[in-house]
Image (tube, rainbow, N blue to C red):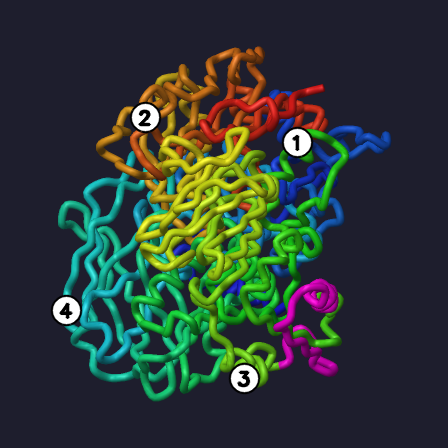
């Protein structure tokens, strides 16, 4: 009830903001059908309606008309539904079902389509982004055709309870700013001597790209003008702008006048309110993310009494639906350290996996530079989803944390899945098993031995009905088998949240206070496991650079004997081992044995790591070439969405192929914005050049025949896609109904990758439109090729999936094919 009220407030504020109260159409009747789709945290999904849409067999819905007959022989028919008094559609069929809405326009018109509570939709057959969490600020600029306009809204499992709200808004302006989803920092006295960053949503309700646009920000007479990136046709984007706050010297609300300019002419104007605080108060800081160039923020609980040279740093990761500044405010300031709360990119975001993990690391890096903590006093904690984040980050990055303290947390997305469902624990199906391999980095139970690097404090309420205390008890028993430095406390009668002491628990911080992380030279034994060196590759002085079987678990156990001047290592699923500075004193020779083989007798570590590679037997080796897989770039498909990625859509195909490419790129950009508070450059294949976008991730939409950028980045790829065929290594697949996702290293960059969203024909391309690759923890291997029948038949529709070897070639050992 509380969240619904908040949603209605947000919608009302937005409409009032653009004077749209008299030009809003609220949908109050429609048709529903379901359940008819299955989406979750894996690459495989089923969707009977999308299957009919892409095959053009979907009959115009009508009350009582048969939609399809399910596997049990049950007939699913369209049913009439009316919105309730709160303008929400509720119906049992909305659980994993679809809502059909129509609007008859007197002429061609431009509008903002706002739907809340859904996972995505088709507007006249074109995919647009969803608002599954009912944030209320997801608006899609659309063009209505004269006459009947059809909207098919995909609703998840909880749709029957939260309801769906749908509006068409006809604003007076075609280019406008939107305030509700604004990202702003606090103005901190005596700290903000440089301009600060904000982020605001900009709508382009025109059929042409919006160019030559700037944002002017004025605060107490201080003006800064920031350039705005190109916003493509009928699209929105959250854009960054700078503000000069140097004239602010009084605590409280501070107005900022924002003016949108095109060629010097004002197009829209908004007044936003900022908050000025003292340096000893909790505050938010903004920064430009290297992931996509967007404006992000983190919350801070500053050290009481000011920073000191030996202070600690506490990284606190928040729970689902919690803002980072709210997380920071749950803690009283400590006199021995600063607490920093990253955002996970959104209050729900990515469950602290994937880009949530990158956000946590990015904020940690910024915080280290800003607050200069003692390097052995870095601590990790979090609550609920952040409790999972603590388990996950703690297991993934051993040696980084002096102490880890999950509060009310669940260890894996296999046991507790929240709104996006669970990762399946296992499967007997070879195709699904291969796909699930890409999710192995999420399974902290397989990485549990890494916890030996840190002190662990587990806090959980014994009456928690949201995240059962049994998760904490399971982890207590797991740690009890091998860990000699953990504490455990069940708060009596504690619910999921029983006050700020659910996280700001004195005994937890006392535990932290007497812990330090070990230096490399103090650590004689290394026990390190990773599922992906591209995520985590090193623990203090030993690491795993390359695997034998990609994304299977790899482990090294190393012992250092200073007396014998010997390092002994045992390995499992490791192709290349690294020894880093700190393994032995500089200039001091030592012997290395790996898997009982004496590899060298006079090794020395200076400022660079040593490499040892297994080719039948272990040998001393050079650092693997950047063109190979390694810690710098190791797949999977999702990893390419990084390094300020750019979406490149094809324009060399037919009209329908080109429209698909743009619509899909825009859909992914909308989903990325919603999921990750993100922003992406969308450009044509003709605009893309290697020199113009150096070292940036590339997401390419189309195939070799339809996207002119293909030969620039994929000429050497072992996967080649044309109309009517897909070639994988030496194998040729034929047909025009195949979709494909794959990744390949960008040839002119030592770290950036290319992600490809493609198809062998229009049907195959449209089969890629629905996806779960922005869902936290969902597993996508290096390549995944499927027929459109997958949407109807599941794994039976998969043609081929697998991982490239360390030379980025098709590996017979890591591929599954259609049976």
Is residue 479 located in the magenta-colored stretch of the structure?
yes
User: Is residue 658 or residue 20 the one in the foreground?
Assistant: 658
Q: Position of residue 518 (x, y in %)?
A: 47, 68
Q: Residue at x 44, y 70 (%)?
A: 378
Q: Residue at x 49, y 80 (%)?
A: 331
Q: Which mark is residue 222?
A: 4
Q: What separation in Å lies between label 2 and label 1 (alpha carbons)?
A: 31 Å
Q: Quadrant of residue 311?
A: bottom left
Callout 2 touching callout 3 (CB < 8 Å) = no
Is residue 645 located in the magenta-colored stretch of the structure?
no
Q: What separation in Å lies between label 3 and label 4 (alpha carbons)?
A: 46 Å
Q: Which mark is residue 510?
A: 3
Other residues around mark 3 within 10 Å, as few (<14) / some (14–19) / many (≥20)? few
| Mark closest to the chain's N terminus, 4 or 1 | 1
| Mark closest to the chain's N terminus, 4 or 2 | 4
The residue tagged 1 is 49
Pair 4/2: label in front: 2
Q: Quadrant of the N terminus?
A: bottom right
Q: Position of residue 183 (x, y in %)?
A: 36, 62
The magenta segment: 472-498
The residue tagged 2 is 685
| Mark closest to the chain's N terminus, 2 or 3 | 3
């Amino acid at each position: 009830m509380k969240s619904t009220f908040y949603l209605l407030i947000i919608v009302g504020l937005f409409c009032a903001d653009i004077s749209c109260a008299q030009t809003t159409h609220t949908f109050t009747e429609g048709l529903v059908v379901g359940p008819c789709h299955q989406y979750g945290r894996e690459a495989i999904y089923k969707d009977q309606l999308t299957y009919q849409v892409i095959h053009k067999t979907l009959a115009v819905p009508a009350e009582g008309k048969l939609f399809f007959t399910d596997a049990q022989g049950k007939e699913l028919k369209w049913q009439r539904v009316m919105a309730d008094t709160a303008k929400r559609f509720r119906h049992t069929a909305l659980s994993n079902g679809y809502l059909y809405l129509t609007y008859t326009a007197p002429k061609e018109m431009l509008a903002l389509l706002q739907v809340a509570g859904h996972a995505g939709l088709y507007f006249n057959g074109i995919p647009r982004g969803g608002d599954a969490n009912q944030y209320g600020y997801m608006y899609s600029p659309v063009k209505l055709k004269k006459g009947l306009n059809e909207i098919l809204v995909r609703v998840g499992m909880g749709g029957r309870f939260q309801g769906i709200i749908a509006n068409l808004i006809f604003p007076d302006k075609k280019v406008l700013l939107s305030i509700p989803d604004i990202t702003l920092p606090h103005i901190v006295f005596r700290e903000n001597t440089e301009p600060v960053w904000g982020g605001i949503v900009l709508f382009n309700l025109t059929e042409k790209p919006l160019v030559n646009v700037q944002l002017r920000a004025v605060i107490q007479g201080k003006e800064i003008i920031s350039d705005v990136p190109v916003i493509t046709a009928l699209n929105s984007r959250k854009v960054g702008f700078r503000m000069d706050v140097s004239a602010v010297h009084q605590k409280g609300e501070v107005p900022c006048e924002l003016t949108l300019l095109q060629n010097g002419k004002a197009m829209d104007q908004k007044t936003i309110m900022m908050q000025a605080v003292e340096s000893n108060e909790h505050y938010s800081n903004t920064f430009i993310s290297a992931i996509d160039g967007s404006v992000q923020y983190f919350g801070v609980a500053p050290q009481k009494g000011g920073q000191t040279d030996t202070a600690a740093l506490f990284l606190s990761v928040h729970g689902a639906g919690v803002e980072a500044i709210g997380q920071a405010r749950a803690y009283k300031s400590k006199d021995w350290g600063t607490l920093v709360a990253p955002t996970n990119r959104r209050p729900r975001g990515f469950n602290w996996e994937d880009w949530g993990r990158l956000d946590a690391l990015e904020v940690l890096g910024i915080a280290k530079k800003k607050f200069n903590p003692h390097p052995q006093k870095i601590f990790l904690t979090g609550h609920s989803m952040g409790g999972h984040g603590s388990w996950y980050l703690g297991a993934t990055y051993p040696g980084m944390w002096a102490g880890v303290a999950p509060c009310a947390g669940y260890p894996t997305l296999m046991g507790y899945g929240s709104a996006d469902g669970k990762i399946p624990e296992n499967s007997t199906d070879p195709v699904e098993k291969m796909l699930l391999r890409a999710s192995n980095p999420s399974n902290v139970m397989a990485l549990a031995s890494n916890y030996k690097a840190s002190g662990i404090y587990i806090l959980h309420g014994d009456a928690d009905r949201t995240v059962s205390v049994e998760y904490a008890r399971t982890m207590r028993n797991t740690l009890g088998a091998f860990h000699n430095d953990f504490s455990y406390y069940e708060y009596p009668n504690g619910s999921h949240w029983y006050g700020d002491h659910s996280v700001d628990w004195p005994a937890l911080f006392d535990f932290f206070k007497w812990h330090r992380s070990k230096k490399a030279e103090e650590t004689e034994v290394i026990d390190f496991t990773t599922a992906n060196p591209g995520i985590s590759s090193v623990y203090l002085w030993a690491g795993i650079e390359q695997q034998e079987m990609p994304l299977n678990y790899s482990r090294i156990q190393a012992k250092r004997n200073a007396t014998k001047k010997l390092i002994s290592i045992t390995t499992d699923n490791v192709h290349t081992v690294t020894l880093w500075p700190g393994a032995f004193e500089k200039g001091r020779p030592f012997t290395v044995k790996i898997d009982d083989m004496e590899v060298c007798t006079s090794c020395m570590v200076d400022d660079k790591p040593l490499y040892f590679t297994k080719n039948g037997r272990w040998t001393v080796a050079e650092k693997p070439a950047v063109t190979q897989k390694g810690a710098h770039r190791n797949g999977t498909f999702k990893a390419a969405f990084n390094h300020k990625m750019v979406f490149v859509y094809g324009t060399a195909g037919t009209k329908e192929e080109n429209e698909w490419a743009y619509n899909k790129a825009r859909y992914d950009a909308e989903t990325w914005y919603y999921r990750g508070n993100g922003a992406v450059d969308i450009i044509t294949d003709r605009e893309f050049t290697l020199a113009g976008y150096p070292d940036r991730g590339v997401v390419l939409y189309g195939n070799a025949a339809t996207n002119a950028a293909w030969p620039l980045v994929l000429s050497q790829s072992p996967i080649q896609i044309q109309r009517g065929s897909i070639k994988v290594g030496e194998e040729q697949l034929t047909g025009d109904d195949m979709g494909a996702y794959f990744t390949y290293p960008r040839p002119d960059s030592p770290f950036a990758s290319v992600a490809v969203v493609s198809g062998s024909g229009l049907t195959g391309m449209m089969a890629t439109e629905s996806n779960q690759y922005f869902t936290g923890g969902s597993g996508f291997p290096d390549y995944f090729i499927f027929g459109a029948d997958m949407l109807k038949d599941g794994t039976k529709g998969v043609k081929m999936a697998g991982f490239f070897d360390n030379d980025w070639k098709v590996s017979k050992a890591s591929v599954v094919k259609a049976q």
